[in-house]
Each structure stands twice: as structure tokens, then as C-alpha cells.
Amino acid sequence: MSKEYLERLDKEEEELAKEYIEWQLSEIATPEKIAGFRLPKTRSLIPELPCKMTATPIMALVPLYECTFLPVYPLFQPKKNEWRKITEIPIFQMRPGLTPSDLSTLAMKGRIIPYFVANFSDYDEKIIKPLIQSGIPRLSALQMSAFRSAHLPGVEHKEEWETIQSQAKKDHEIHYKGWDEVCVSYCIATSYQLGLREYMLKSKKFGIACLSTFAPAAHFLDAVIQTECPEAKKVLTCFGGLPLGVSLDYILEGLKVKYIPEMPLDVYADVFDGKTAKALRKIIGDLLSDPLASKYVQRLNAKIFDLNQQVEEIAEGKAAKVFEAVSDIAVYGGKKFIESKSHEYIKIPKKGLQRVAEWIASKGVDLQAKVSKKDWALAQLYKARCKLEKCK
């Protein structure tokens, strides 16, 4: 990996950017076409913040979404009004909470898609080497710009957009002198389309206009914006919906599925497949549907405790014991029992023996939850906990 290689990547991206523009002008642009690869069904997007921090812990999103778009920054701010290039792994790790190699592991599985917020040559080549290896999915700054330039819903006609841009240009002459012309024609106009004109005129913060363009990006990518940054929450109305001061980490810890460093990253990611992630999203949504739980931590904690009690009731059932036992049989060598007995009663999918054992027992847990009138998502949560226990 060399500086020259990164500069070559930048030149290629400049040429590719012309293709993105042509696709958008001809209305054939799609997320997959611009990214160059297929994207998982459930997606979340962490917006690039002016402070160059990652406010949302990435490991709080891995259990909830099949894929998360994660910003990768080249600079850090050691003190006010001073920016330096990130050249040390501990400094890099302060933002996403993981090393470049860790992110590479998750990216290889498609669970995160790192997107670079600057030219590749602006980064330290040793730091980003794991993220630009062959076969690791990534998005360049220009690709993300293409996502962010997608029109918002409601701007279906060229005339409507031109009216919004005209208002932005008029305000520019009075309030935003010195701002880049591109920001006037698109970023500020996007802020206005989101209904943030008064907020913009009052605060006059450049970061607001920049942040607002992640709203069309999220819509274009069919992704949920996730951020715990207070400033970003004011600008982007579709953030997580968590009570102020409470993070996703808090909820995942309460549900006993939070990631711990001692656990292999790739194994943890495998536990939370599409169905389990869907269950967790439903559980968190149900927790926060209580207006008091979404407002007060004390109430949220009580709802988590009540939910855990229901999971424990599932764990005490016979089917749950079978789930644990059958999984252990597969682990400790009871292959003949599984092979000779299971196919007599159940049509087994063509998977590995460990997965077959879990599949058989899993059906029993699902049935038990249904009979006891428990939510299917609670059964998934119980099964995820069982798997995580074996990973420790």
C-alpha cells in the first residue's frame, strides 16, 4: 500500500463520478448501481458529523441491521481549531470503537460498509490498508456524494426544486456570504426542503446544511439514519427515537445481548442474522412505544426488566431445555443421535450439523412461545442469548 496507489484510486473515482452524474440525469441511478454491489435488505446510515466523531457505537447497530454505512475520517482534533491526520490505531479506534482490522472483519461479512469522507490520498495509508483490501466492500466520498444528491420525496418536478434553490440563493446574498456555491445550490436548498430555513437563518452553522443532505441519502439508500449527536438530531428528524441521554448500548446491555470484546467479532455478527435483527428492532420499537419509556430512563428500565422476565419464562420451558441440549449434542459429538433420529420426524434442510441441530430445537422454542402466547421476537431473543453464552 503506497501513497501513489491511493492517488490512483482518487483519479479513478473522478472518472467514475462522471458516470454517476450521467446515471442520475437519465434517472437510471440505483444504490446498487452506484455502489457496484448488492446491498442487504435492512440498512442503517451513520451520517458524517462536522466534529468528525462517530456518535453511535457501531456495535450497537450490528445486532439491529444487516448493514450499517459507517463514516471513516482522516483527521482528528487534538485541541480546538487544530486538526491532524490520524496515523495511530488507538486514535482511529476512538471514533467507531473498533480497529481498522475489526472493521475489515465486519465489512467482509457485509455487516458494515465503510464510506470514506475524503479522498483516499488524504488518509494515512497504513491506517486504512485493512479497509481497502481486495474483496472488502467500501464507498468513496464521491459515491456517498452521489447518494446525498438524490432528491427528497416531494420534489417531483424540476420547477419545485428550482423554486427552493432560488430562495436559497437569495438568502445567500444576505446571510451566507462566503459560502461555497455548491452549498448554496444544493446543501442549503436541501435544508430548506426539510423545513429548516428558520433554523438555518438563526444558527448560521455550515454543518447543518451539510448534515441535511444525509436525509435524501437515507431515503435513496432505504436506510434508517442513526445518530446520538444532539446537533444532528435537531437537523435529521428520523433518528433512533431514543430518550435523551440513553443509547442503544444501554438497551442492548439490559437485554443481555451487548457485544463484549472477549467475543469473536465474526461469531457475534453471525448470531444476529436477518431474522434475529428484525426481532431486536421489534423489541426495541415495542419498548419505546410506551410514551413514558421513550421519555424517562427509569420507565425504560422497568419495561426492560418486565421483558426479561418474559424471556425467562420461555427459558424455563421444556423446548428451551431441548434447544440448549440439542445444541450441546452437536458440539460434543452426538452426531449419530442427530442423524438417526431427527430425519425420521422432520425434513432437515441441507445445512451443517450444528445448524441442523439448532434448527430442530429452534422450531420447538418458536412453538412453545406461540402456545404460551409470547411474542415471536422474545423467542428469537432467547435463542440469541443461548448462542452468545457459548461464544464467551
Image (cartoon, rainbow, N blue to C red):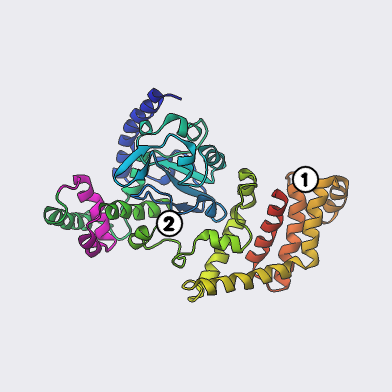
Please state the horizontal and vertical placement of residue 346, each as a whole percent of the image.
80, 55
C-alpha span from label 2 to label 1: 40 Å
Q: From the viewer's side, name the closer residue of 92 and 371.
A: 92
Q: Which residue is mark 1?
A: 353
Please state the horizontal and vertical placement of residue 326, each as a whole percent of the image.
81, 54
327 shown above or below 104: below
Q: Is residue 291 left or right of residue 173?
A: right
Query: Can residue 28 be seen in this snapshot?
Result: no
Q: Residue at x 54, y 71 (%)?
A: 300
Q: Residue at x 51, y 30 (%)?
A: 134
Q: Residue at x 57, y 42 (%)?
A: 109
Q: Is residue 98 left or right of residue 373?
A: left
Any magenta on residue 176? Answer: no
Helix, strand or loop for disc 2: loop
Q: Which residue is mark 2?
A: 227
Task: Tell which tag, 2 or 1, sits nearer the viewer.
Answer: 2
Helix, strand or loop for disc 1: helix
Please state the horizontal and vertical placement of residue 204, each as a whole percent of the image.
22, 57
Any magenta on residue 183? Answer: yes
Q: From the viewer's side, name the closer residue of 258 and 62.
A: 258
Task: Find the magenta span and give its range.
Answer: 178-205
Q: Is residue 250 left or right of residue 226?
A: right
Q: Residue at x 34, y 62 (%)?
A: 234
Q: Which disc is residue 315 wearing?
A: none
